[in-house]
Amino acid sequence: MDSIAVDLARFQFAFTIAFHIIFPAFTIGLASFLAVLEGLWLWTGRDVYLRVFKFWLVIFALSFAMGVVSGIVMAYQFGTNWSAFADKTGAVIGPLMGYEVLTAFFLEAGFLGIMLFGMNRVGKKLHFFATVVVAIGTALSAFWILSVNSWMQTPAGYAINEIGQFVPASWLEIIFNPSFPFRLVHMVLAAYLTTAFVVAAVGAYHLLRNRFSEAAQVMFSMAMWMIIVVTPIQMIAGDYHGLNTLEHQPAKVAAMEGHFDSQGPAPLILFGWPDMEAGETKYKIEVPYLSSIILTHSLTGVVPGLNDFPREDWPPAAIVFVSFRIMVGIGVLMLLVGVWGLWSRFRGRLYESEWLQRASIVMGPTGFIAIIAGWTTTEVGRQPYTVYGLLRTADSVSPVAAPAVWASLVVFVVVYFVVFGVGIFYIFRSMGKSPDTSHGVEEGVPVRSAGITPAQALQPNEGDRSHDD
Amino acid sequence: MMIDYPLIWGFLIAVAIFAYVVLDGFDLGIGILYPTTKDADERTLMMNSVAPVWDGNETWLILGGGGLFAVFPLAYSVIMPAVYAPIIGMLIGLIFRGVAFEFRFKSSEERRPFWDLSFFAGSLVAAFCQGLVLGTLVKGITVVDRTYAGGWWDWLSPFSVMTGLAVVSGYALLGSTWLVMKLEGRPQEHFRRLSKYTAILLVGFLLLVSIWMPFLNEDIMVKWFSFPYLLYTFPVPLLVAITVLVLWRALMRDSDYTPFLASLVLFLLTYVGLGINIYPEIVPGVYTLWEAAAPDSSLKFLLVGAVILIPMILAYTAYAYYVFRGKIKSTEGYH
């Protein structure tokens, strides 16, 4: 297989999965948020929770639909573009994906219809049940797919048969492979944080327009609590994840740190440019000892360098180095916003602090950027392997000629930008609508020429959200 | 006793693909029939009749693909590159029609025709590509050394184009009879009329395929036209003929439910007939179920889950259909 076809297939996978991950990362957090909101509404009877619920339900439906259609693409890419990988690893990771479909996808799809359309058909309690089930489904999906990914990073519990296929030896070891618990915690927290920042940004936007908006206050306050609680936990989880990577994938850590020579004590390179040709990180700004402290929790601990490994086993260091810094940098900013929010809250100025709200709007999309940067770090850091240390990327691709991959790649890029671009635009537009006035207007009156009547909601003066425009 | 796991899984995957074909079949069919009406209200009704269930329906496609990857990885890895273009086409089609469920209700009045078109074209392309895949597989693909070794246009042949059109007309029949069941009044009459046309079209394609297929492959000829196989296979065409009669009479007599149920039976019989042609192979002419299967340990592990979970899935899927049973009256939604 020529290397152009390999690179094209890699780029196609990276592109389609980077687009896809945006939607499930958002819906994992949003589903839980919706379940909490509906629970609070049922518990307290406060109308504002239902309003906020319905506001986000519309956005959830849009992103869920985009997650579904971009996800089906992923289920087939292993075969269309990575058939050698599929043949060799199918017996091990295929059943995990099978479990994802059986435990998560059907559950989500089965109850999503009730969650979106069924409130006046099944009653409040059953509707709440459906919402909770959808939230559980999104989490189960994360469980299985992260197990698959982690197995590719830190394979365990397998044997290799006479024709070179991976075959299962211990399912427990396969599922709970060494990096899985760390990756799962890190990703689920990332999904929650990402959603929290989106909710905070939307709440802030509406507070800036009307600081007395009850719905906006609920959103902003809940999001700020989430941010200040989860960000520190995420940083600790990230540290543990890094230590786990050091143990199992030291070359990846060397690239993340930008170290070519192993050394102890090792400085932390804050910024720089790892030049693989020259074998050194250029233009670097260092903090002495810090890399040893972070990675070995001692002043003089030895930290690996890329030169410890054969040249052909190096990951592309510059990409890993830069994307890792983007993720960490965003994490630091997130913590600052969380602390700022807490401080404003204690001063009783959470809803008045306009600069905090402006900052929150700017920070709105950063969760997505951090997630994509983090995944870039771990996936590019896994190179040049698909199954770390065992199966090379170049030996994993399909026998599909470069022109065919070119054509499909162009189609995917164009279609994704157009279709999901429009979808994201609709999401923005829904976010811009006032969360307070979306209800009780013109009850029962057909909206728009389509003759669409707002569905009767549970409370007498609660019409469904009217249509846009 | 030895349990034949590949055989059980061959059956389960066949069931998953059949579930996909009929479930997504009627909602793709609705998309294919979109241009037969210009009325915006009627189009909203059509879409809303499947809106709560469409992504559950498409999940069967993920089970089909993901299941194949899990239990017959060799089949998955030679089939997908062989039908590269139709699979990509299907995925793109599914994207356009899937988002239309949401976007149609979010767009401005002037943009709505674009999402109507996206719903129609996406459904049509997805259905046609599925038919291309079917035709390509039945005709046979070239495999050397556990790897697809054919060309990039091998999937294009008169036979595969014909099966593509056959699938489109079959889905259109499922869609129109579904709408006969879910709608009332003038729209219902409209789709009752269309059901008659699509039924005639599908029967024509079925005849064509049945005549053509035995000439593709000697094994198929033997199965259908020689003793003693004939004794097992003969009932299939007979039952097809009976079902077509039932369908036609139901359409003439203004029955609401029978046309859809008869169409489902027609699909089932066609599918069984196809299964007879292919069994015991999973990649026709290349691999049997046992040759393509993952080791028993993988099959057993996933089977435990399937045995417990599939009945649950069927139960709550049935519940979801039950919640949204009956005629579509208003256009309730959350949009």
Image (spheres, coloured by chain):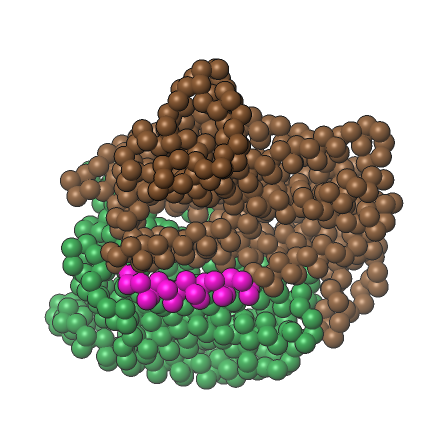
Q: Residue at x 17, y 72 (%)?
A: B217
Dominant secondary structure, magenta: helix
Viewer-proximal residue among B13 and A337: A337
Considering only vertical position in the picture, is A134 above or below B131? above
Residue B165 in the image: state x and y as whole percent: 37, 78
For the record, the magenta segment spans A400-419
Quarter holding the C terminus of chain B is: bottom right
Residue B35 in the image: state x and y as whole percent: 55, 80
Whether residue A460 is visible here, answered yes or no, is no
Q: Residue furthest right?
A: A212
Residue A301 in the image: state x and y as whole percent: 43, 17
> Left of B208 or right of it: where is B120?
right
Q: Residue at x 23, y 79 (%)?
A: B212
Q: Is residue A382 magenta?
A: no
Give the colour of chain A: brown
Residue A452 in the image: state x and y as whole percent: 72, 69
